[in-house]
Image (cartoon, rainbow, N blue to C red):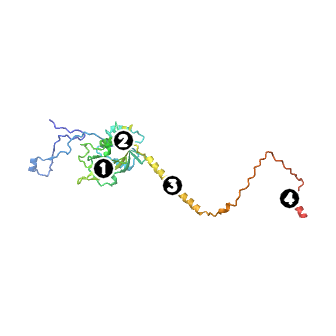
Amino acid sequence: MSAPKRKRGGQAHVEKKAKKVKFVRGEDEAPNEAEEENKNEVTIPPPVSLGKWTNKERVLIFSSRGINFRTRHLMQDLRTMMPHSKADTKMDRKDKLFVINEVCEIKNCNKCLFFEAKKKQDLYMWISNSPHGPSAKFLVQNIHTLAELKMTGNCLKGSRPLLSFDPKFDMEPQYSLLKELFIQTFSTPRYHPRSQPFVDHVFTFTIADDRIWFRNYQIMEEDASLVEIGPRFVLNLIKIFQGSFGGPTLYENPHFQSPNMHRREIRLAAAARVREKQMVKDMQKMKRTEAKQDFVKDVTADVFQTPAEEKPVHIETEAPEPKVVKKNKHKAFKRQRMQQKARR
């Protein structure tokens, strides 16, 4: 019988045995009897993982145009932590979100993490099961990447993570759905060709303040304590859709407030504080002017003031008679009259 063949895609057969390798001697080296007895053969142990790669989960991680440097570093960190992920070029803003399903089909991916940037300051993340759904839309807040060098932990690249979930994920149906979606997306498949057969870090998903807090910790070998590696971010749930990047709405977060409304409330609060300060200044100015006025007034001055008698109102019903004015035709001018008085 022929030896079992190795399948494509880097799969290792279960019945794979140890290899034997021959060492080639140089021209100047003389043959040794011990080497001739061993026939220059050295045994190499078989690989650690002897299993089949059956879970073919692949995650497409990419974004739209207009993201900032922090989002770009966050995407690179996620691709580093998830060996079963794939990358793609940025998507144009004018394209519809349904086009992502076609991109996932071309890339042979059945999960997708899509980062959507708006106004160059708001970041939204879509996590979807392509192409049948469901999908969820989040607002990403408080991003800290590995490039900030604030975390002291370190782990093996490509190792498989443990997923730790808050007990609140099992209490409400929308969180149970998100838990299953996170498990299928962030967990590295077993026996993946690009993964390492070790477990040395933990992904934690915690619910606090109606938000999902993501953290990445390293498991220390000495005492199994946890040291944070990064990245870290907060997901604020907006909606859960039945389809992939659309469809009927399964759940809508009643506590969600859009960033535009939040910024509007901040501006209104600042304007109210400015108006309040201006009113206080005006009141202080009025008090200062009232204090400067001299209140010199005789209290008994109003005693001797008697009201005027009211005269009866006479209404004339007939027109008054015209006055007869006699005109002197030979009346002298004023200068002439003055001269006549002087002569007298």
Judging by the rendered image, the residue that carries numbered circle 1 is: 216
Identify the element where label 2 is drawn.
strand
Percent coordinates x, y for residue 18 in the rendering:
16, 44
Secondary-structure class at tag 3: helix
The residue singled out by tag 4 in the image is 334
The residue that label 2 is drawn on is: 136
Left or right: 333 in relation to 197: right
Distance between the alpha carbons at the discs numbered 3 and 2: 43 Å
Residue 318 at what x, y percent from top left?
Answer: 80, 45
* SS under mark 4: helix
Instruction: Give the residue type that dot 3 points to.
Output: Glu
Q: Quadrant of the C terminus?
A: bottom right
Are the residues tagged 4 and 3 within 8 Å (C-beta)?
no
N-terminal of the pair, mark 1 or mark 4, is: 1
Label 3 vs label 2, nearer the camera: 3
- Crowding near pointer 3: few (<14 within 10 Å), some, many (20+)? few
Q: Earlier in the sequence, mark 3 or mark 2?
A: 2
Q: Rounded to the nearest whole Å, what is the CA distance between mark 3 and mark 1? A: 46 Å
| Mark 1 → mark 4, Cα distance in angstroms | 116 Å
Please tell me how crowded label 4 is: few (under 14), some (14-19), or many (20+) other residues with Cα within 10 Å.
few
Left or right placement of residue 187 versus residue 329 in this view: left
> Which label's residue is closer to the chain start, 2 or 4?
2
- Upstream in the sequence, badge 3 or badge 1? 1
Q: Residue 59 in the image: x percent, y percent?
A: 31, 42
Inspect the image, locate mark 2, and give the three-letter code of the amino acid beneath it.
Ala
